[in-house]
Image (cartoon, rainbow, N blue to C red):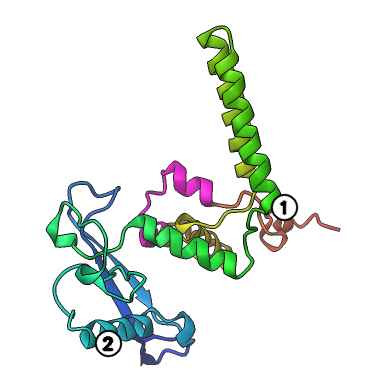
Amino acid sequence: MQIEDEDGRKRSHQALIIKIRRSKADQAARGQEVRILAPADQELCPVHALRQWLDVLADDGQLTPGPLLRRIDRHGNIGAKAAGRPPKDDRRRGGITADTVTDIIKTAARAAQLTPAPTPEERAAAAQAKQQALAAADAAPTAEEANAILKTWRTARRAAHAAVRRITGHSFRRGWIQQSLAVGNPPETVAIHSRHSLRSTAFDAYRRKKIPWNQNPTRFLGLAA
């Protein structure tokens, strides 16, 4: 892509144009494009990663139509050759799922010690709490009391789960939006790239509510000491 830099000169930059054929926000499948400029660091460069992955597919004889991101089983088999239940839609045969992406990200986050792994003691305590709740529900004199016991246990389990820092596939979406806004990109531009409406409650929830001191509107009133 030819992009004009701050000095007015046009320079070539590598980029990806990704066609998203259908999404939650595009049920009619009109299709949307997302454009990504390649960073200088190859470790973070999607263009470099794509080229390497295409080389892997080519070496395996799988540079064929179908999903770009394909599963790999424990034996190193790729795509349709890999073990697993085939999807109903044959066009997606051999591809990964959203759950696969989440598992990869969670595993990487734990390996980088960004999220804590449950200790054996915590696992044992959680299992014991479940057994006690089920036993108490079985011994309850009425169905209403049994349901109340199980509801209390589920509420406590959800609260404990929410208290632990988690990183999922959605963390990448939220984190990118927050960082892009933090460095000064206009919300309209960020929303177009993330395929949100500015009126979206989800997009509004991603925005940090605290304004940096150097952007605080009271700073420009001329009344600061």
> Would you name the residue on which mark 1 appears?
218
Quarter location, residue 216: bottom right
Residue at mark 1 to residue at mark 2: CA–CA distance = 55 Å
Of the 4 image quadrants, the one containing the N terminus is: bottom left
Question: What's the residue at 64%, 40% (across, down)?
Answer: 126
Q: Which residue is mark 2?
A: 55
Q: Amino acid at mark 2?
A: Asp
Quarter of the picture containing the C terminus is bottom right
- 80 or 134: nearer the viewer: 134
Question: At x 40% / y 61%, what residue is drawn?
Answer: 101
Which image quadrant for residue 52?
bottom left
Residue 193 belongs to magenta span: yes
Above/below status of 49 relative to 185: below
How far from the left and from the top, in percent, is residue 7? 47, 90
Work out whether mark 1 precedes mark 2 in sequence or the reverse, and give the earlier one. Answer: 2
Q: Residues within 10 Å of mark 2 (few under 14, many from 20)?
A: some
> Looking at the picture, does residue 214 appear above or below residue 149?
below
- Residue 121 place in picture, x, y as percent: 71, 49
**Do tag 1 and tag 2 residues touch (Cβ < 8 Å)?**
no
Q: Which residue type carries mark 1? A: Thr
Residue at coordinates 80% horizontally, 54% vertically from top-left?
223
Outermost top residue: 141
| Residue 111 appears left or right of 223 | left
Q: Residue 1, can we see it?
A: no
Q: Which residues are magenta?
A: 191-206
Identify the secondary structure beneath mark 2: helix
